[in-house]
Image (tube, grey):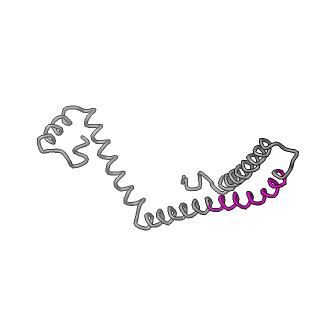
Amino acid sequence: MMKRLDGEITPVEDGKLHAHLKQCVSCGKEWHQFHTLKGVTGEMKKRLLPEMAWEEYWRHLYNRMERGIAWMLISLGLIILLGYASIDFVRDILHSTALTPFQKVGVFALMLGTVVLFVSVLREKLMVRRHDRYREVQR
C-alpha cells in the first residue's frame, strides 16, 4: 500500500494489491484511510507553508542564533568584569599572612565559582522570564 501511495509500485504489484483490496474489507478500509490521510497532509503543506512562512522561519532562526551568540558574549563579559572586580578582594587575601596557601586557593576558587554561578543563574532567570513556551500554540 505504501508503494502505491508513494507512486513506486510496479504494474504487477498494483494488480495484486487491487485484487486483494477487492476481497479484503479491512485492508480496503485501511487503504482508504491512508489515501485520505495522504491527501489531507498534502493540502496542509500547501496551506501552512507558503513562501512567506519559510522567510519568516529563517528570519526567526537568524534571530535565535544572534541572541544565542549575544548571550554568550554578555555572559563572558560579566564573568570577566566580575572576575576583575573580585581580584582586589583576592589580592588582599593573597597578601594576607594570616592565611595558608591552601586557604588562599580555596578563597580564590570560591570567588571564581560564585562569579560564574551568578552569571549563569542571572542569564537563566532572564531567559525563563522572557520565554513563554505556549506563545506559538494556536487553539
Residue 22: quarter of image: top left
Q: Residue at x 84, y 44 (%)?
A: 99
Task: Give the image location of residue 133, x and y in percent.
Answer: 60, 51
Residue 75: quarter of image: bottom right
Q: Nearer the viewer, residue 80 or 12?
A: 80
Q: Residue at x 28, y 32 (%)?
A: 26
Q: Nearer the viewer, residue 7 or 121?
A: 121
Position of 9 compared to 30: left or right?
left
Position of 88 compared to 45: left or right?
right
Task: Give the image location of residue 17, x and y in percent.
Answer: 18, 38
- All told, the count of numbered labels is 0
* 37 in magenta: no
* Region rendered in magenta: 73-93
* Residue furthest to the right: 98
Q: Residue at x 76, y 43 (%)?
A: 106
Q: Is residue 118 above or below residue 102?
A: below
Locate the N terminus and report the quarter of the image it occupies.
top left
Position of 138 compared to 129: left or right?
left
Task: Give the image location of residue 76, x and y in percent.
Answer: 65, 59
Q: Residue at x 86, y 50 (%)?
A: 96
Q: Nearer the viewer, residue 7 or 131?
A: 131
* Residue furthest to the left: 12
* Residue furthest to the front: 97
Q: Is residue 125 above or below residue 1?
A: below
Magenta segment, prevailing SS (helix, strand or loop): helix
Task: Give the image location of residue 98, x and y in percent.
Answer: 88, 45
* 76 in magenta: yes
